[in-house]
């Protein structure tokens, strides 16, 4: 539950490449000379799109992603137009299942447009929903491309969705840690006498529950999901001991000894350390500074490293 505010940064230049490569899969089906020409030409369309993406400036925040994604939609639309032109000019030599691939492309374009619209509005919830639809549309295009025997088409939906989710996740994570986590950090740094612990236990539990509710609503990208769940679990363990401590302080006088409370406080400290370690693993993936005991908030956590995870060949 860190307390390091920072700019709403989420460098996601890879999103455009993933969006565009949703037009370009491997197959075991042999090809004729005519089909080979079609595949080569389709690969050239995808390669051209890739080059345009690589030349584009990298967005520095979720808000910047709106403008960048709109440019990406234009390139996606142009690439699909070029692929449709190839379809018409190669009508006699298309792979037997090429129709299924072309039928999947409008869904990719629509999902890309929805993603760009949500990003332009800086709407975190809509961006998450659009990213999931983009993932699904990309998967359908990938499957259709493989069935048609195309060499490079249909890939990129997972990377595109994860790039959007990463930008949203990082922005919201910063807001949560600035809003709630910083308050928790202040409570944790309060000198640990029994009287002070009793005064802060209710507030700590309230803030931790609020943090858990908001943190649990975040939709992590695939390569951050395991660390996200571990952080949630460690915070749940921490809340469990806080609840026991709260009950102990509320118990009838004499029913709980001072030694028992001291043991609970020691358990609380150990679980707080584990929760902090889990959060720092999330922060590492996000390119943010770690939470450290008695550390001052960082005014500038820095840009998000890219890529966050190794690239894959999935849809």
Image: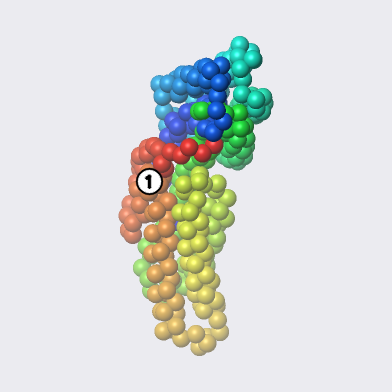
Q: Nearer the viewer, residue 65 or 213?
A: 65
* Dot 1 alpha-carbon crowd within 10 angstroms: few under 14, some 14 to 19, many 20 or more: many
Q: Does residue 94 sit above or below 238 in this rendering? A: above
Q: Does residue 41 sit above or below 121 in this rendering? A: above
Residue 65 seen in the current view: no
Q: Does residue 9 sit above or below 57 in this rendering? A: below
Give the residue at mark 1: 288
Who's the residue at 40% across and 38% down the image? 307
Q: Secondary structure at mark 1?
A: loop
Q: Does residue 304 sit above or below 112 in this rendering? A: below
Q: Residue furthest top?
A: 89
Q: Nearer the viewer, residue 242 or 151?
A: 151
Q: How many marks?
A: 1
Residue 170 locus on image (x, y percent): 47, 43
Q: In terms of image quadrants, where is residue 147?
A: top right
Residue 73 locus on image (x, y percent): 56, 23
**Colouring used for the render:** rainbow
Q: Residue furthest bottom?
A: 254
Residue 95 locus on image (x, y percent): 61, 24
Who's the residue at 40% across and 53% down the image? 281
Residue 133 locus on image (x, y percent): 62, 37
Q: In terms of image quadrants, where is residue 92?
A: top right
Where, quadrant-wise, is the C terminus in this rendering? top right
Who's the residue at 60% across and 14% down the image? 90
Where, quadrant-wise, is the N terminus in this rendering? bottom left
Who's the residue at 65% across and 25% down the image? 96
Residue 50 seen in the current view: yes
Q: Nearer the viewer, residue 123 or 55?
A: 55
């Amino acid at each position: 539950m860190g307390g390091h505010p920072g700019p709403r940064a989420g460098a996601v230049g890879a999103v455009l490449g993933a969006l565009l490569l949703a037009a370009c899969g491997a197959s075991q089906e042999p090809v004729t000379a005519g089909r080979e020409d079609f595949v080569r030409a389709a690969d050239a369309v995808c390669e051209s799109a890739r080059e345009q993406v690589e030349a584009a400036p990298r967005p520095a925040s979720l808000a910047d992603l709106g403008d960048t994604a709109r440019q990406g939609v234009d390139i996606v639309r142009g690439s699909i137009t070029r692929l449709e032109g190839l379809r018409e000019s190669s009508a006699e030599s298309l792979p037997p299942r090429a129709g299924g691939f072309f039928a999947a492309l409008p869904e990719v374009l629509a999902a890309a447009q929805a993603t760009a619209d949500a990003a332009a509005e800086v709407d975190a919830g809509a961006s998450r929903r659009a990213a999931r639809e983009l993932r699904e549309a990309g998967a359908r295009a990938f499957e259709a491309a493989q069935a048609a025997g195309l060499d490079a088409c249909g890939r990129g939906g997972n990377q595109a969705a994860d790039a959007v989710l990463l930008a949203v996740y990082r922005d919201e994570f910063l807001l949560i840690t600035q809003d709630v986590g910083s308050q928790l950090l202040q409570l944790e740094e309060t000198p640990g006498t029994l009287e002070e612990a009793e005064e802060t236990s209710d507030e700590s539990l309230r803030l931790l529950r609020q943090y858990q509710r908001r943190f649990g609503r975040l939709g992590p990208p695939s390569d951050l999901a395991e660390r996200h769940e571990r952080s949630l679990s460690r915070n749940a363990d921490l809340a469990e001991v806080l609840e026991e401590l709260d009950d102990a302080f509320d118990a009838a006088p004499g029913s709980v000894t001072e030694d028992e409370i001291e043991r609970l406080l020691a358990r609380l400290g150990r679980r707080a350390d584990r929760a902090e370690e889990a959060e720092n693993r999330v922060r590492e993936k996000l390119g943010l500074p770690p939470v450290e005991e008695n550390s001052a908030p960082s005014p500038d956590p820095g840009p998000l490293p890219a890529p966050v995870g190794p690239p894959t060949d999935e849809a």
